């Protein structure tokens, strides 16, 4: 009976891959029946089930899977890969379960309707529009910075506890849900990563565990980055799987927040991407705009840059290349560079709304 079950599961793996390939061509179906249909209930269930536990169950699951994989490799090498009929079948059966769980619990969100279509905005923008958008962002960011510290040379300090920052991020989503019901978020499940040290040296701020729905945060990163990082991971929990879309949702949450420091975190986050894109399109204009930024704002950016430089290591590019491959395999052809495409959403959204 066990062999028969393993055989059925193994056969189902290529059928699942084919099924996902077909579903990927029907984003409206995914959007209606999964992302806005059953997924919110799945996500909420896991948040209420595991959110009260102070540590990440998903991280323990990752560790368990890693141990299983290492044990599997050790045994295979020790036995010189003998009796392949048994272990190959079992491996495909296990992968079939993992593949199904990943997609049904979260992964199908990668194939939902693109956010620019949901928001009825364009996905292209001109260099002129980008320049004007960057100038407006600078104006608002400088205004917020001055209102907080009253001194152009002083950086903004985020004197909040991690719990306070999580609650502020949640409050932002609660305030937004009247206008955007799909951002309804209840049942907090945001936890510090148990793998903070390797996560830092890999160069990542946080991640979502797709099998448990928990958002893990790298608590070592500067507090200046935590409001947008927490908001980004909540965006993933809400079903915005693509990195550019989760970044846009993070901007939407922080830039519209009642708390002025949360707004400052959001505007500087958006400004970084906007100026980064302008540097590629018009380096001279971008450098001119960067030059007018107050020293205090630059100090906030430098704080983050120094943190990552401190933890640079030879393996980091390989980790990012691996993650880029993961993104490409999940409907993000630009890989890790897809983070930069948040600019298109920002420029066109605020052009449409006219409330930057």
Image: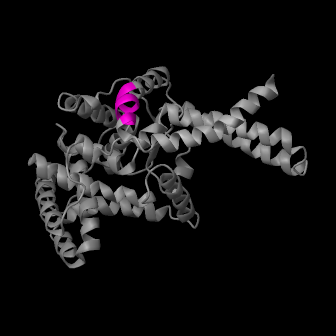
Of 84 and 286, the residue lying toward us: 84
Image quadrant assignment for residue 284: bottom left
Residue 33: x %, y % from top left: 38, 28
Q: Residue at x 85, y 45 (%)?
A: 84
Q: Residue at x 44, y 61 (%)?
A: 308
Magenta: predominant secondary structure element?
helix
Q: Is residue 166 left or right of residue 292?
A: right
Q: Say if the magenta span includes residue 87.
A: no
Residue 249: x %, y % from top left: 29, 43
In this picture, which residue range is highlighted in magenta? 29-37
Compared with 154, 228 (above or below) is above
Q: Residue at x 34, y 34 (%)?
A: 166
Q: Residue at x 78, y 27 (%)?
A: 4
Which residue is the extreme one toward the left? 354
Compared with 238, 288 (above or below) is below
Q: Is residue 277 left or right of residue 205?
A: left
Residue 163: x %, y % from top left: 36, 33
Q: Say if the magenta span includes residue 34.
A: yes
Of 58 and 324, the residue lying toward us: 324
Of 97 and 307, the residue lying toward us: 97
Task: Pick the quarter of the image with the N terminus.
Answer: top right
Q: Is residue 112 left or right of residue 323?
A: left
């Amino acid at each position: 009976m066990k062999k028969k079950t393993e055989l059925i599961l193994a056969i189902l793996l290529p059928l699942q891959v084919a099924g996902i390939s077909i579903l990927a061509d029907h984003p409206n179906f995914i959007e209606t029946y999964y992302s806005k249909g059953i997924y919110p209930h799945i996500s909420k269930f896991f948040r209420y089930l595991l959110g009260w536990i102070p540590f990440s169950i998903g991280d323990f699951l990752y560790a368990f899977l890693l141990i299983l994989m290492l044990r599997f490799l050790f045994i295979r090498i020790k036995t010189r890969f003998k009796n392949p009929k048994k272990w190959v079948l079992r491996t495909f059966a296990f992968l079939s379960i993992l593949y199904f769980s990943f997609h049904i619990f979260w992964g199908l969100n990668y194939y939902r309707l693109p956010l620019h279509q949901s928001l009825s905005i364009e996905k292209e923008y001109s260099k002129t529009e980008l320049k004007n958008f960057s100038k407006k962002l600078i104006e608002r960011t400088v205004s917020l910075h001055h209102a907080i510290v009253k001194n152009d040379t002083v950086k903004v300090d985020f004197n909040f506890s991690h719990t306070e920052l999580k609650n502020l991020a949640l409050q932002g989503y609660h305030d937004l849900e009247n206008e955007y019901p799909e951002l309804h978020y209840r049942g907090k499940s945001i936890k510090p990563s148990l793998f903070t040290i390797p996560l830092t040296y890999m160069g990542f701020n946080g991640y979502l565990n797709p099998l448990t729905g928990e958002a893990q945060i790298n608590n070592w990163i500067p507090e200046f980055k935590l409001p947008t990082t927490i908001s980004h991971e909540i965006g993933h929990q809400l079903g915005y799987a693509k990195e550019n879309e989760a970044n846009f949702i993070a901007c939407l949450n922080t830039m519209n927040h009642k708390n002025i420091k949360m707004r400052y975190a959001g505007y500087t986050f958006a400004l970084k991407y906007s100026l980064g894109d302008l540097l590629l399109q018009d380096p001279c204009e971008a450098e001119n705009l960067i030059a007018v930024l107050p020293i205090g704002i630059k100090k906030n950016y430098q704080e983050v840059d120094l943190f990552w430089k401190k933890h640079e290591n030879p393996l980091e590019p390989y980790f990012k290349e691996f993650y880029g491959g993961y993104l490409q395999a999940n409907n993000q052809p630009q890989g890790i560079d897809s983070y930069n495409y948040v600019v298109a959403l920002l420029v066109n959204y605020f052009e449409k709304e006219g409330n930057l």
